[in-house]
Image (cartoon, helix red, strand yellow):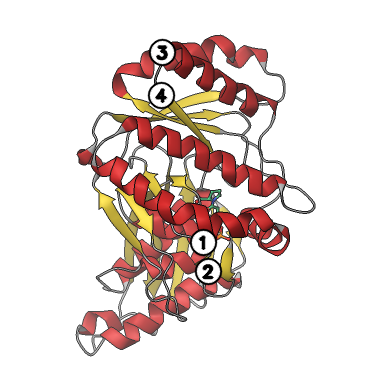
Amino acid sequence: MKPVTGISQVTCTAPVNIAVIKYWGKRDEQLVLPINPSLSVTLSQDQLCARTTVAASADFKRDRVWLNGQEQSVDAPRLQKCLGEIRRLARKRKHKDERAGDLLGSCVHVCSENNFPTAAGLASSAAGYACLVQSLAKLFHIDGDVSHIARQGSGSACRSMYGGFVEWTMGRLEDGADSVAKQVAPAEHWPELRVLVAVVNAGKKAVGSTEGMQTTVKTSALVKYRAEHVVPSRQEDMRQAILERDFQTFGEITMKDSNQFHATCLDTYPPIFYLNETSKHIIHLVHRYNRHHGKIKAAYTFDAGPNAVLYLLQDDVPEVLALLRHFFPPSSTNNSEREFVQGLPDA
Ligand code: 2P0
């Protein structure tokens, strides 16, 4: 084994992913195993993303972590889990590749930044943990799929480990080894697809996803029905729609799945409301716009917050953007922020 001198350092970026089949509910809290499979589109690297630098040195006295410039507790269980799993893999691999063992005696410093509002329901934890695990894996010379480690940081993070269209398989094994992310198709497969993110409110969400989905699983009959009887066939139909670049089916399933996810939130006791009046106006606007054209030209989806994400095709971006700006001019807001970000799926 080579002695470690100086600092080894790696920087990675990982983009946000926006689910079209939503993950909401765990069957194993510790291992972060979902009650249903999910499917998402990873945005491009230069749009909403996390940027993480990890450094290791024998001179560092302890592991430390900073998020957006603020030092965080390194004892956060999910952070510990990711660090521990990476070191465990490195120990296992060092017999095959001695570089994997080089940094095992060193502490790490992690510095991560998001270029968008953290915890506003814009998948910040997904990008953050995907980026952390990707950079740690690089630092420790671990190759191959590590989405099962990102998953233990934040479920949806496993999907941000790949670009394009990505599914997170539910898995059947007790240890979660088969609950991993897989690319359905690369972004180049559907180059005309566009994503518009309408930031309705950039504030922190009232109920965090982890806590929210726990209450839903405990109290909602609808979420159980959804996981058992709705999502499995929807996941297949969505995969097929993507492979065939069938925007009508893609859009319809996207909207229905967003609506059902929010219905499970309403079915939670006490209920969880992530959508606000602006979100609901956007939903109505999209349905009116599609009805006017006699087909689906835009599809909305909302995560654990009021911000709208619209999927549409390239040619329709100027019209939809103009429509949003007409009905929701940024100047009409008082304490909420509205801005529109155009995203491209990652190439
Ligand atoms: C998704 N969301 O599929 C769904 C839709 C929010 C609504 O994945 O507890 O932050 O860390 O596994 O990954 C948010 O859940 O939750 C999420 P944890 P996570 O994108």
Q: Earlier in the sequence, mark 2 or mark 4?
A: 2
**Foreground of the two, 187 or 92:** 187
At mark 2, the secondary structure is loop
Q: Are marks 1 and 2 in contact (CB under 8 Å)?
A: yes
At mark 1, the secondary structure is loop
Looking at the image, residue 280 lies above or below residue 209? above
Residue assigned mark 3: 293
In the image, which disc is placed on residue 296?
A: 4
In the image, which disc is placed on residue 154?
A: 1
Looking at the image, residue 233 lies above or below residue 110? above
Q: Position of residue 156 (x, y in %)?
A: 47, 56
Amino acid at the residue labelled 3: His
Q: Position of residue 235 (x, y in %)?
A: 40, 51
Residue at point 41% right, 33% down? Answer: 251
Quarter of the image with the C terminus is top left
Quadrant housing residue 297: top left
In the image, which disc is placed on residue 95?
A: none
**Foreground of the two, 299 or 134:** 299
Residue at point 23% right, 85% down? Answer: 2
Q: Earlier in the sequence, mark 1 or mark 2?
A: 2
Residue assigned mark 2: 32
Closer to the observer: label 1 or label 3? 3
Determine whether, in the image, residue 87 is placed left or right of residue 333: left
Label 1 C-beta lies within 8 Å of the nearest ligand 1 atom = yes
What is the distance, in whole Å, between disc 2 and disc 4 at their CAs? 35 Å
